[in-house]
Image: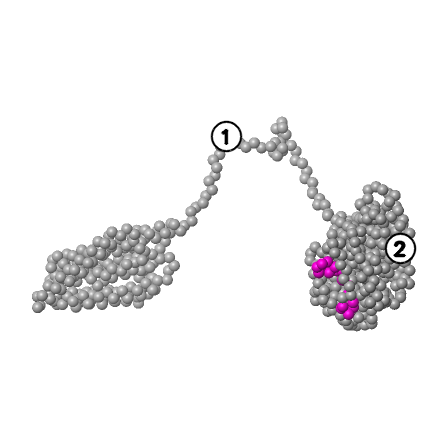
Amino acid sequence: MGSRSASEEKAGSRQRLQVKVNEYKENQNITCVSLRPVQTTVLGKTPKVYLVPFSLSNYKSDQFKHPKSLLNKNSNNEFVCKKCKKTEIRKTCRRILTPKMEATSSKTESTLQKSSLDVCTESNKRQHKSTSDTVIPSVDMESIQNLDSDEDTTLGLDEFSGLSPYERKRLKNISENANFFASLQLSASAARLREMIKKRQPPESKRKMPKKRENGTGCRRSMRLLKVDPSGVSLPATPTQPTLIADENPLLLPGPLEMTPENRDDDNDLFKGFLQTWAEVSKTSIKNTEKELSSIKNYKANLNGMVINEDTVHKVTKGPILSVALHPSEIRTLVAAGAKSGQVGLWDLTHQSEEDGIYVFQPHSQPVSCLYFSPANPAHILSLSYDGTLRCGDFSRAIFEEVCRDERSSFSSFDFLGEDASTLIVGHWNGNISLVDRRTPGTSYEMLINSSLRKIRTVHVHPVHRQYFITAGLRDTHIYDARHLNPRGSQPLISLTEHTKSIASAYFSPLTGNRVVTTCADCKLRIFDSSCISSQIPLLTTIRHNTITGRWLTRFQAVWDPKQEDCVIVGSMAHPRRVEIFHETGKQVHSFFGGECLVSVCSINAMHPTRYILAGGNSSGKIHVFMN
């Protein structure tokens, strides 16, 4: 039995050795070697693999033959532990392959497996301690050399008395092949890493300079561009002149301007007849405006009789209309419109031909935001513009006289402080207020007041107590007393702070001034009770109305009807297009529809003071007139 078991163990050891030899032969046929280090166990020992920083610039051929530099980076304790572990491995190998263990080869194999596991755990611990960013695999050649030395000392041929010469030769060959295979893996992985680093480096992009032609002809160039005379003499340098940028809207010359229509070149007799008609218009009596208000029922009946047709719609100015005024004459129907282009258009609707009754003038260079007929002389029309000028058109003399001029500031609105139209109050876009007296010579203002508003859009005077006037700013509406204005700064008597967005306009009711209507961008029309001007004015009604006109349309401005001061007129964004009238209680009184004659939004509207005539202007320069 003993001889049979010994023969079986020898046969098993031969098979295991043959398997290892075959594995090595198969590994020799591998063309591509992985970067991952492979652990090979030979007689219970495993080559240890470390990860060390590597750079191609500092690479040396014999770097991997002397890895003892790694031990210098570790602490002394680690160096001592490593020596202890090496001696333990040597003792283990001696203990396994002593002559006393010749008969128990199975026990030797189990001991070899345990020692290999211990060495593997040691190598794993050392791998986890690596903290470098750029690493390459390197095999501890010292362990391999120790393996050879151990094999020579502890595994000598004299001590393998239980093995045949053939088996001892095979074991020696296997150990040599293991050393060769480890060095092969190391060189292959290093070569592979060099190739990867070279691939990651961006290629140097250098622009190739074109070769100069020595004998070739160059490009032809113009002698004018080279500033060379045809004879070959260089021309003198021309002095550079500064380029002047022309102003889009240059200011007109100060002083009076002649009434020269832009849409009429000849036919002077017709224009003279037009001026004579406007000059002969007598002042309308105010007896009709002082009577009591008519009932809402009669007022609605009169509004229902107002119609529009093709003859009462015409383009008067070029560009959007910002202001509209109706002449107070009861005989003729005369409409004036101020445009964004600085034009002032006049239209006589009583004329048989539309073209013969329209005249366009250019008294301003910027938008005309405010336009009124003089209450003292209806043959005068006063216009205010953003260009800082206020002019009076006198049809009897056919000139536009300059009333006020301020090139440093832009005007926004004005109104008459006195009934004789001799004194004016002017609002500026920068929040200032100026008092102008037409009786004094010159075109400057009498007083400039700094208000508490950053911007003023409209100015309106109380119709009865003319010392009070109301201004519409960005978010607030203020009421001032003209008798207590201070040039250094004036505080308002009353502030209306109910608005949440930008305010477009604020006006007193035309007869008594007991109501104030404001138009705000929050889609609301507000009516206040101003019958008693004290420290506070109560809010009576809030009317929901779409006031979002957008960028290309003129903003809405709700105005009072001069005949019916409890009703306001305002444009509408609703379809079909219309002009609406609301009562001070918030109820809708009437809507003017025009069918095909009214297909646009009439943002600016004005009512005749005594007759039932309504004129509305849109953003293309057209005037729409509703009349009985």
User: Image point 25% across, 60% down: which residue?
Assistant: 40
Residue 575 belongs to magenta span: yes
In the image shown, does 595 or 369 lie closer to the viewer? Answer: 595
Q: Amino acid at mark 1?
A: Gly
Which picture quadrant has residue 552?
bottom right
408 vs 296: above or below: above
CA gap between label 1 and label 2 equals 91 Å
Regarding residue 229, the answer to whether it shows in the image is yes
Query: What residue range appears in magenta?
Result: 571-587
95 vs 21: above or below: below
Q: Which residue is mark 2?
A: 331
| x and y, in percent, of residue 203 in the image | 42, 47
User: Label for residue 372?
Assistant: none
Q: Amino acid at mark 2?
A: Ile
| x and y, in percent, of residue 48 in the image | 27, 61
In the image shown, does 567 or 344 lie closer to the viewer? Answer: 567
| x and y, in percent, of residue 377 in the image | 89, 56
- The mark that comes first in sequence, 1 or 2, is 1
User: Image point 89% across, 66% down: which residue?
Assistant: 291
